[in-house]
Amino acid sequence: MERLIKTEADYDNALAIIDGLMGAGPDTEDAERLEYWAKLVEIYEDEHYPIPKPTPLSAIQFAMEQQGLTRRDLEPFMGSKGVVSEVLAGKRRLTLDMIHALHAGLGIPLDTLAQEMPLQPQGLDVSTFPIKEMKARGWIKPAGKGEVEAAVRQWLDECGLGDAPLAYAARSSMRLGARGDESAMLAWVCGVKAIAAREPLPTKFDRAALDHAFLRGLIALSPNPRGPALSRDYLAKAGIHLVVERHFAKTYMDGAALLEPDGTAVVGMTLRYDRIDNFWFTLLHEVSHLALGHVEPGSFVVDDLEARSQDAREREADAMAMEALIPSEAWEPVPALARTTPEFVVGMAEKLGIHPAIVAGRVRHETRNFRLFAKLVGSGEVRKLFPEWTS
């Protein structure tokens, strides 16, 4: 009796029937039976032996094989020979720009390219880390050239990353753009973790406490000339470490939000731009990541806020930060042209009880005119408040 295939025995029997019908001529009863049994086998195999979706890396390799492409042919889509090599070796993940370029240029489906692309956790390549700067900061102290790798591994282990730092990075989110250096990013994150670990906070982090009132209280510090420095104590009372650590040369990180396995929360900032407006937006963006639950224990979010991102979490953090800094009910009724005057900037800042640089920075961002209000964004007013940056 012909019926649905439910067991392995049924499956083997169906394959035997198909084998016996393979010679059936067209438009015959056997041909119809062959089609029927083939469909049953297809249904069974789809359920029990599904074909896994190709990984981003395997999809790229397949496209290269099918289209006769070399590694050099991939450079226009990824940026450089070195980046191509790292992606194909599983040492670098695809950025959003790479994903869209590969989709448009090679026809690889977006949903395939956008899958998580875990990095290879083994084979730590010490040469990719900013060794010179790590030495200068006292993070590693190798006795000699031959001790560099051991010193880096020990330092990573002390930071809680163990022998699989890239696996740690793969669990996290990076808004770095095509110019991002993941090894330098990871080194910086590890340094931030180590600095935060030196001074445990008396208050345990509670995400539920990061409500609108908390954010408004944080922003209310901004008119104070020492507001950025005061924000450290304010965040500490909520169980959040604020760590200021310079970015590495040729890197473009602005900030990060980290959550340790024990629930310890950390916001890291590079002060890459020494401006009041940039400080407050970056700080609110990273705090928003924590408030919105974007950071899982044992992972982090790190941001180059100039990099384009279609990640929903980044859009949510941007929106939350902007709304907390300047509520839309105060901003939207004002015509765009009217916002481009110094009187508007000062008046809106007084109305909201915030630093004028925050208003000026919002106008500059929306108009893309970064020559506007150059004297109102608080240039040179932040780094001097953090001795650890200038030392």
Image (cartoon, rainbow, N blue to C red):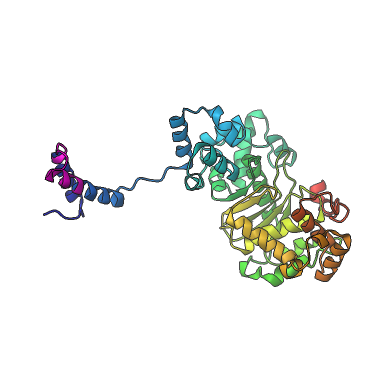
Q: Is residue 280 magenta?
A: no
Q: Bounds of the magenta span?
A: 21-36
Q: Quadrant of residue 196?
A: bottom right
Q: Is residue 25 left or right of residue 219?
A: left
Is there any visible trace of residue 278 in the rendered image? yes
Q: Quadrant of the N terminus?
A: bottom left
Q: Is residue 153 above or below residue 299?
A: above
Residue 149: x percent and y percent?
61, 34
Residue 212: x percent and y percent?
69, 70
Residues 184 and 24: in front is 24
Q: Is residue 89 above or below residue 376?
A: above
Residues 145 and 76: in front is 76
Q: Quadrant of residue 316?
A: bottom right
Residue 326: x percent and y percent?
75, 65
Residue 97: x percent and y percent?
60, 43
Identify the residue at the far bottom of this view.
213
Q: Is residue 8 left or right of residue 161?
A: left
Q: Is residue 44 left or right of residue 239?
A: left
Is there any visible trace of residue 94 in the rendered image? no
Q: Is residue 30 magenta?
A: yes
Residues 91 and 229: in front is 91
Identify the residue at the far front of this view.
27
- Give the residue at x 14% y 53%: 2
- Give the residue at x 51% y 40%: 120
Q: Is residue 300 above or below residue 237?
A: above
